Amino acid sequence: MPTVTKQRPLPSANGPPPVLGPPDSMLSRGVPVARVFMPLPRTYLFYGINRVGKTSLACQFPRPLALVSFEPSPFTGGATSVVKIPGVTYYKVVPSTAVGRAPDLPGLIPGTMAAMRLAEELAEDFMSGRKMFKTVVVDGGTSVQDVALCELMDLPELPAQMKFAKSKEDRSYGVATSENYMDRSAKAKEILRKFLNVPTTVVILAKERDHNPPKDDKGNVRRDKLTRGLQLESFVAPDLGQATAGWLMDACQCMCRMYVADETKIERYNVNGQIQEQVIGTGKMTRRLLLQLQTNFAAGVQCANPDLPDWVEGNTAKKLYDELIRVLSL
């Protein structure tokens, strides 16, 4: 008869750790996974088209909150939509190459080096026990790249239509080389990593784009971005360089696409003693957060809820935030 080995009971999160090896061994450092479980994600990435409400959603997170804007809007940097929300402190990052060429802005952070110093000070503040802010919002990840590229190319702002160098030797003013874009990716990662390392809730916002856009019969990318539909090959994800986007999506525990959809409700009917349900439209629009990876859309959440829905919705930023936290907490 074969020998049956009795299984040891799994250790609880509050019990003593299992003895896995000699005290001075690396093997002994293992702990029950329940001990490293976090009830909610610490790092979030929300992406979507302009004006969909990403900043308003981000500012529903616990406050006091630091809103660090890299957005190109000359004065408010996209903060107008949250001006009536209490407990939000605003910082506006501009390229170091633009400092002195524009009016001194409220909350001005002069350049990427100063922005990284701000992130370090936020981390130091938290570690010291002061904890001035419960949440740090970076608005937005897409514009971090633009600010970095301005500095790399010594431009106060990027031209409306970027030009690409036809050769490595082309150093014309306002013409970007492949080296510029490689350096931009490295700089953007460095900046975003600094903020993600702040040991509190961190929310990164980004625009969206199709990373595998439709092409015409000749293999050229179709340029009618505002009107074209999705193709089978389309994959919509944060609007960042592919290397930066892939790294950031892995770095954030909760990545959601924010979009507008038709609001629906469930009507229940009694038909011959049987309760039947029907989903009907309300005629209104609502905001949704995509939580699960789809064929054409990037999304994904690290949480313990085995029944996480594909999406959550809310017709206000507060309702959408509350519904997100509710399903993540299950």
Image: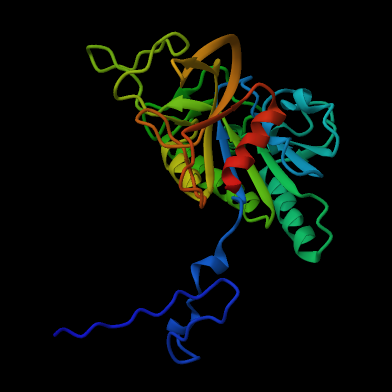
Q: Quadrant of the N terminus?
A: bottom left
Viewer-proximal residue, 304 or 9? Answer: 9
Residue 94 in view in this figure? no
Is 211 placed left or right of 127 in the picture? left
| Residue plotted at (32% across, 18% down) | 231
Query: Which x, y percent locates residue 298?
Result: 43, 34
Is 79 placed left or right of 305 in the picture? right
- Give residue 106's quadrant in the image: top right
| Residue plotted at (51% across, 12% down) | 280
Color encoding of the figure = rainbow
Query: Which x, y percent locates residue 255?
Result: 52, 40
Seen from this angle, which residue lies furthest left? Answer: 1
Viewer-proximal residue, 5 or 100? Answer: 5
Residue 159 in view in this figure? yes
Query: Which x, y percent locates residue 59?
Result: 73, 35
Query: Which x, y percent locates residue 144?
Result: 60, 37
Is 178 placed left or right of 253 in the picture? left
- Give residue 140's quadrant in the image: top right
- In this view, 274 is above or below 257: above
- Give residue 85's quadrant in the image: top right
| Residue plotted at (24% across, 82% down) | 4
**How many numbered discs?**
0
